[in-house]
């Protein structure tokens, strides 16, 4: 039985998605099964935690996992650990610097990196069940993203990106997944995974703004000199445009969404806005809202003290809004930057066939595909190596679940970090 299958679950505002895959020797993703369950408008607008009782949502999650499991079972595979990829308004980020000085050389080990992070999270009141990311190291005045194995230092500075959650986030997730018989829930920070896989090495080095347009939020990540500089979530997305169109043009939500994608167009020139007989000032409605979202992005860049001239690789974007006509021109006209739409085709082993057709037809899969590269690839029933989110242990049978209290008390860093060795060069 294969022991390198990664299963990723995404609980979005517009749909539940589940992807089972594995990374092949050439570094590309082999899609083994993919399923999507759409959510209704009330669910999208109110948010998935508040819109349904846990039992209702648990049923939906169980159903999508069952569908994926059935596809895997046909080829003798099975679901083990599941990773949850997150990117929504429940999450926030905080950048913090940890410094350490010594008169004598001190060896920097993976345990020290983890210990520094734990102490800082305790100081900041951040749960250790949420993942974190090391933005950079400064060892004796030398700035780097990855470091030699166990280097020594006298002066150390580590720049961390901590993930914070809004009130009751972990309790809500824990209550939900307590009703679902899973062996483990790992956690992956979707936007960070996306910039690692979607951006080219030139873009990361030259400076780039990555925008992921979700249903109810837009995630923005700034990368410069191969380092993630900042990450912010703006509380407006594709549904904001559709809601405006639905109200202004007296259309139901689904019809408004169809018109938005197929009939309407953003424009870089307000004088070119189209007035159609059926949807009235539809172009103007979505154009005004999109301009507002872009202004939010520019305001956030200003808060980050990021000069647009330093983003020499321009803007890379993904998500459902990216399917709308004219977005490239509108982004370019308002920012003065070059733009391109992110593509996941180059990340996949196959780009056609039964297994990938449904995946590629879904405009919102960039997050889940990129996240699949950062699971620990131990999802087929073999004994995993570390504990899981919400205090769950990674074990498949009662005998292995009766491990030591010390093992039970450990917390997961999240699937994104795979292992502490990711911080070190080969």
Image: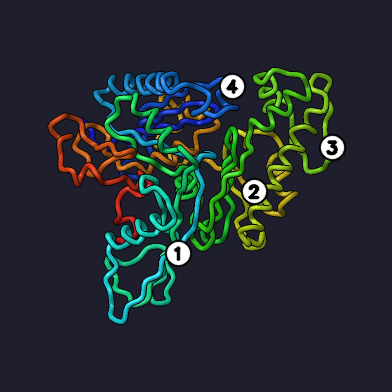
- Of labels 3 and 4, earlier in sequence is 4
Mark with earlier residue (3, 2): 3
The nearer-to-camera label among 2 and 1 is 1
Residue marked by disc 4: 42
Q: Position of residue 105 (x, y in %)?
A: 28, 78
Disc 2 from disc 1: Cα separation? 32 Å
Name the N-terminal-most of marks 1 and 4: 4
In three-dimensional space, the C-alpha distance between marks 1 and 4, rounded to whole angstroms, equals: 41 Å
**Tag 3's secondary structure?**
helix
Camera-nearest label, 3 or 1? 1
Mark 2 and mark 1 residues within 8 Å of each other at the beta carbon = no
Tag 4's secondary structure? helix
Q: CA distance from mark 3 to mark 1?
A: 48 Å
Which tag, 2 or 1, sits closer to the chain's start? 1
The percent position of residue 316, horizontal first and vertical second, equals 59, 47
Measured in 3D between alpha carbons, the distance from the residue under mark 3 to the one under mark 4, in whole angstroms, is 34 Å
Q: Are marks 3 and 2 in contact (CB under 8 Å)?
A: no
User: Which residue position is annotated with label 2?
Assistant: 339
Say which residue label 3 marks. Answer: 272
The circle on residue 97 is 1
Residue found 33% across the figure and 33% down from its top:
82
- At 59% from the left edge and 52% from the top edge, which residue is drawn? 209
The quadrant in which the C terminus is found is: bottom left
- Residue 412 in which image quadrant: top left
């Amino acid at each position: 039985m294969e022991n390198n299958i990664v299963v990723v679950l995404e609980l979005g505002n517009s749909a539940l998605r589940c992807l089972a895959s594995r990374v092949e020797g050439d570094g590309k993703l082999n899609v083994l099964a993919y399923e999507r369950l759409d959510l209704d408008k009330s669910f999208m607008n109110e948010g998935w935690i508040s819109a349904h009782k846990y039992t209702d949502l648990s049923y939906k999650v169980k159903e999508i996992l069952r569908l994926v499991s059935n596809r895997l079972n046909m080829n003798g595979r099975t679901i083990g650990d599941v990773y949850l990829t997150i990117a929504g308004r429940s999450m926030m980020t905080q950048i913090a610097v940890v410094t350490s000085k010594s008169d004598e050389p001190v060896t920097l080990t993976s345990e020290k990196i983890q210990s520094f992070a734990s102490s800082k999270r305790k100081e900041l009141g951040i749960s250790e069940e949420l993942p974190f990311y090391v933005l950079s190291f400064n060892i004796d005045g030398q700035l780097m993203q990855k470091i030699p194995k166990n280097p020594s230092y006298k002066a150390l500075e580590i720049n961390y990106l901590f993930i914070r959650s809004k009130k009751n986030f972990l309790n809500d997730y824990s209550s939900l997944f307590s009703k679902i018989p899973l062996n483990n829930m790992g956690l992956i920070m979707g936007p960070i995974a996306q910039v690692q896989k979607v951006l080219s090495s030139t873009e990361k080095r030259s400076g780039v703004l990555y925008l992921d347009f979700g249903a109810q939020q837009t995630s923005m990540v700034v990368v410069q000199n191969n380092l993630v500089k900042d990450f912010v979530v703006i509380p407006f997305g594709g549904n904001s445009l559709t809601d405006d169109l639905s109200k202004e043009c007296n259309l139901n939500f689904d019809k408004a969404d169809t018109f938005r994608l197929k009939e309407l167009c953003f424009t870089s020139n307000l004088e070119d806005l189209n007035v159609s007989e059926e949807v009235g000032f539809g172009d103007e409605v979505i154009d005004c809202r999109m301009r507002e979202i872009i202004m939010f992005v520019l305001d956030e860049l200003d808060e980050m003290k990021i000069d647009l001239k330093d983003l020499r690789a321009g803007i890379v974007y993904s998500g459902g809004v990216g399917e709308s006509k004219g977005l490239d021109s509108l982004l370019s006209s308002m920012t003065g930057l070059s733009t391109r739409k992110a593509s996941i085709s180059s990340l996949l082993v196959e780009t056609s066939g039964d297994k990938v057709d449904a995946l590629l037809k879904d405009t919102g899969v960039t997050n889940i595909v990129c996240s699949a590269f950062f699971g620990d690839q131990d999802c087929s029933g073999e004994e995993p190596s570390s504990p899981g989110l919400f205090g769950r242990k990674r074990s498949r049978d009662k005998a292995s679940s009766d491990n030591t209290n010390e093992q039970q008390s450990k917390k997961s860093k999240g699937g994104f970090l795979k292992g502490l060795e990711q911080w070190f060069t080969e």
